[in-house]
Amino acid sequence: MLAANRFIRRFTTSAHTMAQMRVAIIGQSQFGEEVYKLLKNKGHEVVGVFTVPDVKGKPDPLAISAEKDGVKVFKYPRWRVKGQPIADVVEEYKSCGAEINVMPFCSQFIPMDVIDFPKHGSIIYHPSLLPRHRGASAINWTLMCGDKKAGFTVFWADDGLDTGPILLQKEVDVDPNDTVDTLYNRFLYPEGIKAMGEAVDLISENEAPKIVQPEEGATYDKLWRKKELAKINWDQPTEVLHNFIRGNDKLPGAWTTIDAQQVTVLGSSMFTGAKPKGEEVEIAGMSKPGIVHKGGLILTGNDDKMLNVKTLILEDGKMIKAEMYGQAPEEHEKLELTDEEQQMADKAKSIWVGILSSSVENGTDFFKMGAGSMDVARLVEEVHEKCEVELQNEDVYMATTFEEFIQMMIRRHRGLDVVEFTYDAVEMDVNNMHLRFPNQLFINNEFVDSESGNTFETINPADETVICKVAKASPADCNRAVSAAKAAFEEGEWGKMSARERGKLMFRLADLMEEHKAELATLESMDSGAVYTLAIKTHVGMSIDTFRYFAGWCDKIQGSTIPINHARPNRNMTYTRREPIGVCGIVVPWNYPLMMLAWKMAACIAAGNTVILKPAQVTPLTALKFSELVVKAGFPPGVINILPGSGSVVGQALTDHPDIRKLGFTGSTPIGKQIMKSCAESNLKKVSLELGGKSPLIIFSDCDMDRAVRQGCGAVFFNKGENCIAAGRLFVEDTIHDEYIRRVVEEVKKMKIGHPLDRSTSHGPQNHRAHMEKLVEYCEIGVKEGATLVYGGKQADRPGLFMEPTIFTGVTDNMMMAHEESFGPIMVVSKFSASDIDGMLQSANGTEFGLASGVFTNDINKAMYVSEKLDAGTVFVNTYNKTDVAAPFGGFKQSGFGKDLGEEALHEYLRTKTVTIEY
């Protein structure tokens, strides 16, 4: 007996079996069909389905499903005549013997003889939080009134209009740009179906409440279906207009008069920021002209705020993108389909037939056959799944017949509908190429001017000439970018797409970066002073590798299952989810403008976040060129935003913004401390910091001298010393010190100082004048404190910001050079004795930094001992600067915390959620 009980318990999820109910379903539509299916699956007996007659020979979806299952279906055109029940209809209904009437969506008047007949009466679904918005247009009114909460009510039917006692309610926050369709599709429909099943279960278990509706706050809103009701009155605040437009949605559709024709406007959102450039159009009753621009049509209320609509329905019923208003409609030559495309068309036809439950010809109109918004959503999803073509809901509304739809779908498949991405470009001929690049802010997939109109000059350090002016972002621009990133994360396609689709976009972006490698490297060289050959291999090459590496991680981010103690006699399961954080801010430095962008951004977006990145003010150009490629790769708007400007303004705005949940920073330690403080005081943002370094490099006498000289020079002079892991202090064993210095000087003399675009140049200009002046000052202090200047120590005698490669010896622990980073081409050398390795290590670790370090020796025991004792995030042995996209990178102590690159970098942009289930 005990064994039998244990066996049964393992498969039982509740202490008693739920009583089955005899259910009559009265209603129609796909919503009614899904409620029917759910109740059947729960084991309730559906004794009859009462629905509307066929429309043009097409049965209602509820009728189709019920007839398939052999359930009795009754199709009454009406239940009453002149207010009196039709006796035969009522008797036929009663003969089914229902214990409960379930009315998921019913457009007919049902007599009280029917409502009250079953043992448990009747329950009705209503798409508002009763007693607010009683009536048949509840969703419209919820939005038109600007309600912050929406929801639905399952209530007991009585003889009033939506006045019966409440059985259950569920609510949801209204998103700022929700429409009737989006609110219904994301919440009212799916959650409403489940709630109807829950309500019937509560009734069957005698646990269903009957809560009398309060009269306080009750509203009865009139039916909102007539077109004349939906005319827009422009003499209202913009937010009121926005709510009116989205509340009218496609039916009845808010309309106005443009160029003497009635035009319905759809897809409204509040518009912040500077007024966009575009064509003005006169709109009847509006105090200012509308603006047709790249993103839609700008409209203005009486408070001078703006909203943007994306879609228009013209007087002839044709739907167009608002940005196309006033332009001649595109004439597309009819496509001849290949065999493969014909197979796609056949699959699409079968999808149409499945949705419409009717035969489909070329002239069949999707909506005239009775399709609604849920059918549109289903069509888009099934075409994506079965035909591998990605469409938007609006595409269906703009190609309503089957022939138009197939032509549109195949054009999209061939890439013929791709609109060329245009912007106001800076153009120049340089480095044997014609270079085009943007110089505006990049927000929501558009290049825009700063709201303030301010700009700054970016300088070529090779000759200190102005390359171009660049838009200078303000806090208001930061707010716009954060709003776009938040919308992309919470509402846009980015948050809905699968991890594998994210990876495909990242791979595509990496391919475009490779295709435009020479342009990116040229910009990097002009803007930062990087030698072109290094820029193309490292600055750009590693950036491409980084995006490809993290693209591969997108669909491999996963949680784990964890065994925990069971709450006997029940059982428990715990699992973790690795989730994106949300909107992230990234601030990068000027030494590797594109590579630092890639190191942080690739992990951030691979994890599913959206991002606002601030490039260094002195090197914004490769980040902006990269933004152009983001659009070409097909990233949805708002996922990636780039804001050039000052750290004190834009960087501070990012750290202070309450909607940014993570900030990644690479830069100096003092600024890192300020960022950490601001992030804590604003909203306790998660922070990762890659800060300053003073990396020790130890050269033992038993090293491979050729390698140690070559790699030691690279450790200091790579990228003209503007390298966060540059060897800040060399410790050379005393027995080889003089020879080592002699050979290093010989190597340095071979270095060619010259224009960074010259392929033979090995040492380019420092990034900007202020930095150049600090390096000269650094050398002057070194000489003053008693260090020996062996080579260089001054600005090169030529135009541009060129610093001579510099070598100092005789540096002791008490000197500034022993502790402070130069961030330039300055080699700082100290001697040590083999008899005092621990003393040398104490000096090597005697700074507040711990980013990187290195050791050259052929003795494995020394290498292991020293690498263990060095207090740094990276230790190089018999090599230097050997970073890789798969190897985590980050520092200790005041060099920061958190990792870039490798799997560990993903953890910086993910959060772990623990889910525990009892069953």
Image: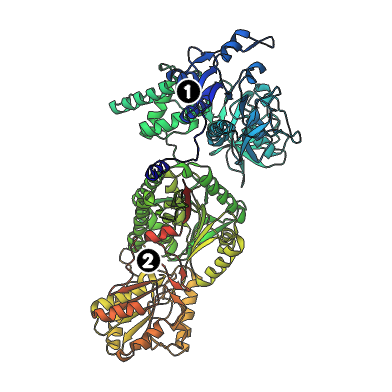
The residue under label 2 is: 755
Residue 766 at what x, y percent from top left? 43, 70
Element on which disc 2 rests? loop
Q: Answer with left or right where residue 273 lies relative to residue 17.
A: right
The front one of 830 and 911 is 911
The front one of 434 and 558 is 558
Residue 582 at what x, y percent from top left? 51, 52
The residue under label 1 is: 400
**Which of the 4 image quarters holds residue 207?**
top right
Which residue, as the protein is rendered here, is positioned at the far right? 216
Amino acid type at image mark 2: His
Residue 422 at what x, y percent from top left? 47, 42
Q: How many marks?
A: 2
Q: What is the distance, in whole Å, between disc 2 and disc 1 at their CAs?
A: 60 Å
Q: Is residue 272 above or below residue 328?
A: below
Q: Is residue 794 above or below residue 234?
A: below
Q: Answer with left or right where residue 698 lies relative to residue 312.
A: left
